[in-house]
């Protein structure tokens, strides 16, 4: 039975107190939304992910999901409930059997948690992950005075992903569009649909405050990882009548580089380094130069493919070190631009990307200004 995930990323995230919405804030070098998507993509039960974003967030979304093969995002509504409904309507034509609705600000949902929700859907139309309430509950008035103690027996803290029979959830959202519910379990409850509780996870907390951001960074730092290096090297000859493209940027020069694609020697080296790190061959094995589809294509397409393969395995790109080899053009005046472009294409903080240049002291084909070469080394980490 097909199950898709609906990732809710349409909020403004203003409670975090930063200019950028919290779902696009970096956590250990990757946008929070990207970490949430990567966590869900590690769950074999899910066949597809659909993301719902806020109006005007397209550029942030594109940067966070670069290299991933996802359907176009759905633009959400004025409330979370309206945004979920729009996401469900976008999936209605496909009509999956089940849907999981998950908050983008919960980047630590584990495959085990998703598995429990999916298992619950074998016997229920709605499943809610819940944590027990262990603290004493007090009612506090507007003046800050404690006015009563509340019984905690039978209470639980609701989490996401919440799982549903797709048709049941869609119908409930259509019927109760005018009601104000805090989560989707509350929407189906208005139709009298029983909701099955399964065990949630403490690490699956919702990032809301600066303290939550610090907790998330600390959690990521503690996760054991295995580290792998990959290297790449590429060469292209100069050719008249072509633009010179490096790191996705067109540089002023009297000649470009010859090649079937745009011949971006820098991105080719980085792409091969990424493919080498996961033992997936080289660019030519994925994008044969004999295939007319890749004629003059931007090499960012190759890079996005390689980064997607790395992240589909749960991998993180920790650092990239690129060296461009040639006499001309001089790279120094363009170094910061090239570095920023490469970091953006990889969805990395620029502090984790190095772009250098060197010459061969007038020796060899690079010294004779017949072409350019590039070599790259990448550091990757994967969960144990």
Image (tube, rainbow, N blue to C red):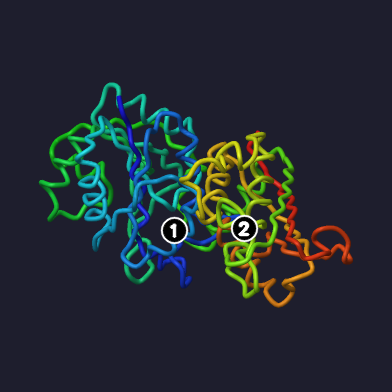
Residue 229 picture quarter = top right
N-terminal-most mark, 2 or 1 = 1
Q: Position of residue 308 (x, y in %)?
A: 53, 44
Picture quadrant where residue 359 is located:
bottom right
Disc 2 is placed on an element classified as loop
Give whichever of 108, 312 is nearer the camera.
312
Residue matched to label 2: 264
Is 206 positioned to the left or the right of 217 in the image?
A: left
Quadrant containing the N terminus in the rendered view: top left
Q: Is residue 121 above or below residue 264?
A: above
> Seen in the image, is 124 located left or right of residue 160?
left
Q: Position of residue 130 (x, y in %)?
A: 38, 38
Element type where label 1 sits in the image: helix
Quarter holding the C terminus is top right
Farthest residue, direction bottom:
333
At x 44%, y 53%, the residue is 105
Can you tell which quarter of the image residue 143 is in? Answer: bottom left
User: Which residue sits at x=74%, y=57%?
Assistant: 373
Q: Which residue is mark 1?
A: 62
């Amino acid at each position: 039975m097909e199950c898709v995930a609906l990732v809710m990323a349409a909020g403004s995230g203003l409670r975090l107190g930063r200019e950028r919405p919290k779902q696009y804030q970096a956590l250990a070098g990757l946008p929070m939304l990207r970490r949430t998507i990567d966590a869900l993509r590690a769950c074999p039960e899910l066949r597809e992910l659909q993301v719902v974003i806020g109006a005007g967030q397209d550029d942030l979304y594109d940067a966070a999901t670069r290299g991933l093969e996802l359907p176009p995002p759905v633009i959400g509504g004025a409330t979370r409930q309206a945004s979920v409904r729009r996401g469900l309507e976008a999936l209605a034509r496909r009509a999956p059997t089940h849907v999981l609705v998950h908050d983008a600000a919960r980047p630590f949902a584990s495959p085990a948690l998703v598995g429990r929700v999916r298992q619950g859907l074998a016997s229920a139309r709605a499943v809610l992950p819940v944590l027990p309430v262990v603290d004493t509950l007090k009612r506090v008035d507007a003046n800050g005075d404690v006015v009563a103690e509340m019984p905690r027996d039978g209470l639980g803290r609701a989490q996401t992903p919440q799982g549903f029979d797709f048709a049941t959830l869609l119908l409930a959202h259509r019927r109760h569009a005018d009601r104000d519910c805090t989560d989707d379990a509350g929407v189906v409850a208005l139709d009298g649909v029983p909701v099955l509780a399964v065990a949630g996870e403490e690490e699956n907390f919702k990032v809301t405050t600066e303290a939550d951001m610090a907790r998330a960074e600390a959690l990521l730092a503690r996760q054991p990882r295995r580290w792998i290096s990959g290297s790449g090297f590429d060469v292209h000859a100069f050719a008249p009548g072509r633009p010179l493209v490096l790191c996705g940027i067109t540089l002023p020069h009297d000649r470009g580089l010859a090649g079937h694609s745009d011949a971006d020697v820098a991105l080719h080296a980085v792409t091969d380094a990424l493919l080498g790190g996961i033992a997936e061959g080289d660019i030519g094995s994925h994008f044969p130069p004999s295939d007319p589809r890749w004629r003059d294509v931007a090499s960012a397409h190759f890079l996005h493919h390689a980064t997607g393969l790395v992240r589909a395995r749960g991998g993180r790109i920790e650092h990239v070190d690129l060296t461009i080899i040639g006499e001309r053009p001089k790279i120094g005046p363009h170094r910061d631009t090239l570095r920023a472009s490469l970091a953006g294409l990889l969805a990395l903080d620029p502090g984790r990307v190095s772009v250098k240049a060197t010459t061969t002291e007038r020796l060899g084909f690079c010294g004779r200004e017949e072409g350019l070469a590039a070599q790259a080394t990448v550091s990757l980490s994967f969960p144990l």
